[in-house]
Amino acid sequence: MSKNIVFLLFLIIGFCNFAEAQITSNALKEETNIYEKVFDVPLQLVDQQSASFDELYAQRPVILALIFTRCTGICNPFLVKLKENLQFKTQENPFQVLVVSFDPRDSVSDMQQLAKNLGLEENKQWTFAITNSISELNQSVGFDPVWDSLRQQFDHDALLVGINKEGYITKKLIGLREKGDLELLIGSVNNIFSPTYRLPNQNSLFSCFNYDPVTGKNKPGLGLIFLALPAVLTTILLISISYSVRRRRQKREQLS
Amino acid sequence: MQQSSILLLFFFLMGIALIVFTYVYLSSKKTDQGMSNPLKKRFWFFLILAVMMGIFASVTIPKSPYFAFADKTPAKVIHVAAMQFSFFLSENAIDPEHPSGQGIELPVNEVVEFRVTSLDVNHGFAIYNESNRLITQTQAMPGYVNRLRYQFDEPGKYNILCLEYCGMAHQVMRSSFTVK
Amino acid sequence: MESIKIRKITSIWIITVLTLFVASIVLGILMRLNQGGVLQQSPITFYSNMTIHGITMIGIWFVAGMAGINYLMERYVKTSYTANLIALILTVIGVLMLWAVTLIGKFHTAWTFLYPLPLKVMWAQWATPTFLVAMSILSIGWLIWGISMMTQVLKKYSIAQAFAWQHFKKDPGVKTPPFILISMITLVGVITCLFVAVVLMALYFAEYFSGGSFVNDALLMKNLTYFFGHTIANEMLYLGLAVIYELFAEVSGRPKWKTSWYVALAWNFTLIFILTAFFHHLYMDFVQPEGFQIVGQLASYLASLPAAAVTVFSVWVAVYRVKVKWTLTNLLFFIGVAGWVIGGFGAVIDATISNNIVLHNTLWVPAHFHTYNVMGNVLFSLAFFYWFSIQFTEKIVSEKFSKLILSLLIIGGAGFLLAFYIGGADSIPRRFSNYPAEFTSAKFLANFGAIFATIYLIPILMLFYNISKRCLKILFSSSS
């Protein structure tokens, strides 16, 4: 009886560890503009330099974040979380973060202030910029902010766009995302190819593998236990039968 | 054409097997000497087989399709959602609640990528060329997206057939696209 | 020495298997005729027939192999009549349920019942749970049987001896008969894949009764399904080989085959390869980690090495320039081995990932597995059935009769299979009730296959009649 309870507890703990959270259908919006070329806009960077977008991405692949400084909603938490999650980054897969404002009111000094607030002024990996061709940029990445005159705010997705060194959009992420998804994004801009990916699933608990983007490899999942279990069971059975058969024979020989 | 060489190889091997077995059988009618040096012959037989299989394995495993064109940027991404009993093909992601598709045209001589999933049961996504030859395929598994990259060398109309048994209309589940 | 009881129960197995075999062949011929446009079945009827045809064929040749080794095992250890009987009863119940589920309930998932198809009910509501229960009954019955036989072997041989490990030493001491070694290896594989079936059924039941709150992972279920399905089909072939190792020399009037170090080595390795080859069914599931895919190809390749270098070569050694007493029994064995080898070529070609991309789920697949059966394993079992039936009855078949049977089997089998191989090379899909018009060779090949399958059926009917008559005599004889 106690063995059953232990086994059940093990299962429950297993469930909790491996159950996947449900993600909303942002997944659909993320699958637009893939492998399309991003519009090469002229950028005005915070250090007063101007550069064209293609000069930037030719040096290093870009993770593009579109925000506006007067945002009272998601933009700040979004950038803070991005900064936190990217702090772990190693040198293997280079990338740079380009934060561009889609609000025509934002100036270069507004962006500089933003960088200061985030403590990213000196950070070589982050570039803050504005552009006068924002509508072309928005269109090429499938970004559609809507002005809400009541709240005097833009209504928009928290969007990250991965752009590789050739200027192609490799992946989009919408919303506040965890390290794993960011690793996928960084992998994608470095043209690391995975022949498959899993969809956000409902209540599916036992999978064979979970892809770990940090290592780029598959981590064994609970489902693997089900694959290995039969062979293990048979081996145990084999050994226990042989053992009990011998025990009985020894007992019989002792008695006779 | 890959299938023709496969069939030829098979017939060749089958022919050898038939010859060997017939020869061995006929030899049993003649004498009663048995095989001389069977252990040595067995060893050589094993060795030759092992070497041949080793060659086949090392030549063919790198040709596996999983990472074909992995370092290229595809010119187009087509999302494919299979469902009992039709295919939805679209340049945009397909909403599982309201799946819809469109006519697809792909560029010739460019790498394209199919992102294939299923909305219900397992299906197969198999591409046939105008000579009705199967040229490439992948499975459509619910909950997963398989990425199939291919470069079409010939323009024309290509058919898609479902190759994983999926129910009563499996045999009429099909679609097509053009390559220009 | 075996008892009368085991003779009788083996007779019942044989008659049951042969009856179901004939019925299944007929279903198969009807399928081909439908594909050829000669018949017009509704797709649901076709697919229900296809489902029960597949389940029955795998089931009967599996139990035929088990019945064969059970009977021969009595030469070495006492086997349990009870376990044999339980398996027989549960098999009959399970099979009857499955025939009802498919022919009446119109359950049509194909024999591989690939998740989540059984749960997408497009047939009678009762069919899905009944199917799951039937499969569970079969699994339990066969598990009892397999574990029982394994236990009986272990009563006489230690694990090391059963696996013939002592033969790696210069002086092995206790000699393990090849039959025991192969039976043991095969039973371990059989029990493993039946445990897989139990796990699979448990997951199915969990989802079925959860009302949607528990959903299985499609990839895991596919792995489990093919772990069970491939392995049981592979093992049934090896059950037939165990019989060959035991009977071929005896029937040919030659000294018994012995276990040597390379026989032991080959069969021990075979166990590992058999249990990992099933990955070759998932090549086109790009979701599968690449490591598993490569394991699948390597295991499939490697499995052919011990088979060829040990078993096939041993058969050649036993025949080449040896004055073999050829009878129907050993001729069936010999031709069966040739068929198995040829099927193996088709299999290894398809088990190559870079070929599989143009062969997967085309007619090449039924081509190779029908070769393994129609011209391989079926002949092994028929050989055993015939040999068994003549042990206790007089008058063996005439040489002319044997020649006729074998010629028709070969001609029928060859034509039937050729249609599949050519169809596969023509990219014609498998499991289609009707072929799209653009496959211009498809209908002709289907009808061609049907004709030759009918030619194959004729000697089967002759053997069915001949063997069953003898078995009925054995069954109803009052004494030894």
Image (tube, coloured by chain):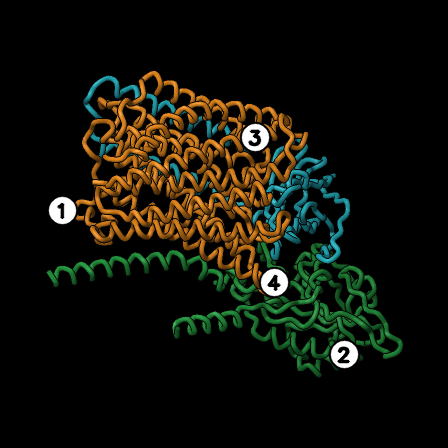
Residue on which disc 2 sits: A73
Rate crowding at label 1 as few (under 14), some (14 to 19) or many (20 or more) other CA atoms within 10 Å.
few
Tag 1 secondary structure: loop
Q: Are tags 3 and 1 found on a single chain?
A: yes
Q: How far apart are the alpha carbons under marks 1 and 2?
A: 82 Å
Q: Disc 4 residue type?
A: Gly
Q: Which chain is green?
A: A
Task: Where is residue C95? Give x, y as percent.
Answer: 47, 44
Task: Where is residue B159? Give x, y as percent.
Answer: 68, 38
Residue on which disc 3 sits: C30
> Is residue A134 visible in the rendered structure shown here?
yes
Task: Where is residue A45? Give x, y as percent.
Answer: 75, 72
Q: Which chain is cyan?
A: B
Output the chain of dot 1.
C
Residue on which disc 1 sits: C171
> Does the residue at mark 3 contact the one at mark 2 (Cβ under 8 Å)?
no
Task: Where is residue C104? Give x, y as percent.
Answer: 58, 42
Output the chain of dot 4.
C
Label annotation for residue A102? none
Tag 4 secondary structure: loop
> Does the residue at mark 4 contact the one at mark 3 (Cβ under 8 Å)?
no
Q: What residue is at 27 percent from the left and 20 percent from the top?
A: B27
Label annotation for residue C211? 4
Q: How far apart are the alpha carbons under marks 3 and 2?
A: 68 Å
Tag 3 secondary structure: helix
Q: Colour of chain C?
A: orange
Q: Earlier in the sequence, mark 4 or mark 3?
A: 3
